[in-house]
Amino acid sequence: MAELPSPNINDSELLTMVVRKKDGSLTADEKPVVKALLNRGMRNQDIQALLNVGRKATVNSARITEVKKSDQIAPAPDDAVEHFIARKRAFDPKTGLNAFEDERLVRAREAMMVAVQVFNSPTVIFKTEVFAILANVAWTYLLHEHYLRTIGTIIGDDGKTWPLSFMLKRDDCPLTKGMKRNLNALKDIRDTVEHNILGKADDKWLSLFQACCLNFDRKIRELFGNALSLQGELAFALQFSKLNLEQVAELQRHDIPEHIEALDARLREGMTEEELTDLDYQFRVIYTLDNASKSQSHFQFIQPDSAEGKEITNILVKFRPADETHPYKHKAVWEEVSRRSGRNFNSRHHNQAWRLHGIRPRPGDAAPEKTNKKYCVYHPAHKDYTWAPPETSSF
């Protein structure tokens, strides 16, 4: 039978007992610490602020007052108080992680950040080796934390913590098939390049490394919240060095060691085209070329399976002579507009139009070439302007 409240308790105290939530109460470990802090002369509101750091259910000031009034609570020793304060101050306000309580997640994020920073560093030579090792560490810590929170253990029959390869084989592994293939490929790379000469093979697996990073950021957010994303620390999409056409050609001119070529073939062996193109396995960007005027040229990076991705999305500039793109002189423009519209449109109307819309500078301007090139271009050789056809330059 539940214990009945004392008949000396007033209505407000009884109401407090009824509505108080267990999560908002002080723990048995916190009460002695609060007592010690009070004995140090710390104010109630400062103790309350310290207690509530990192708590999901906050403690109100009444709980501290209860400790102050109680003669049954002994103050905690100094070392326990200092440890408590250190734990509270170890919370990262951005991620909500605590270096004491969430050590595996802190280490997982740090290992992946260091892996990317090392790979991007122009002063580091052994990029593939370091990245493969640190990425393996990052994913191991991440999955260890997942299994500790879901099933409560990461210890195998041999008394050791589960390796990444074991967790990837479990039926309850939270990763996609593409993510698993990516991590198995990284393990194979790590084991093969260890103590071997790579030559110029670092760039050979950029797509695998990029996918590994993007997968890690996606999965840590899905499992533990968006606040743990690495995008803020590593800026744009955990990017790696960008390869231009000259760099690709240079890479192809280098001799790749036979054991590295064999590894590359082994990674692809038995994989279907669908598996190879899975973005969780490797990150690939395809550039397609299109013709566009200079003012309309731009780059777009989109998902390949989206509607836009099935069309041409990355546009390069094609230069064409001005005589082709802007064949009309001043008189020809207003005469053509008048003819097509059937309305009186003369030289004065044309001048008013380009001035109103700022298409070209006024006569005598120090920079006559500053025109809106969609409609008009300046020819320094004969110091005049020509215009695009009226259908693209209607005012």
Image: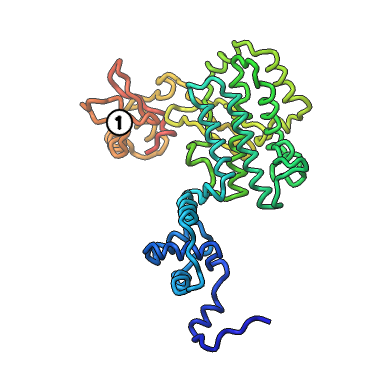
Who's the residue at 38% across and 34% down the image?
337
Number of marks in the image? 1
The residue sitting at 52% across, 41% down in the picture is 230
Residue beneath disc 1 = 360
In the picture, the quarter occupied by the C terminus is top left
Above or below residue 363? Residue 198 is above
Residue 117: image location, x then y, percent: 51, 30
Few, some or many residues within 10 Å of mark 1 (<14, 14–19, 20+) = many
Instruction: Residue 50 in the image: state x and y as whole percent.
Output: 44, 59
Q: Secondary structure at mark 1?
A: loop
Whole-percent x, y for residue 164 in the image: 69, 37
Q: Quadrant of the N terminus?
A: bottom right
Left/right of residue 229 with respect to residue 370 in the rendered view? right
Q: Is residue 22 visible?
A: yes
Residue at (71% x, 34% y) in the render: 181
Say which quarter of the image contains residue 309: top right
> Of 299 and 347, which appears nearest the observer?
299
Q: Position of residue 81 (x, y in %)?
A: 47, 57
Q: Nearer the viewer, residue 206 or 121?
A: 121
Can you say whether 387 is above or below 87 in the image?
above
**What is the three-letter code of the residue carrying label 1?**
Arg
Residue 310 visible within the image = no
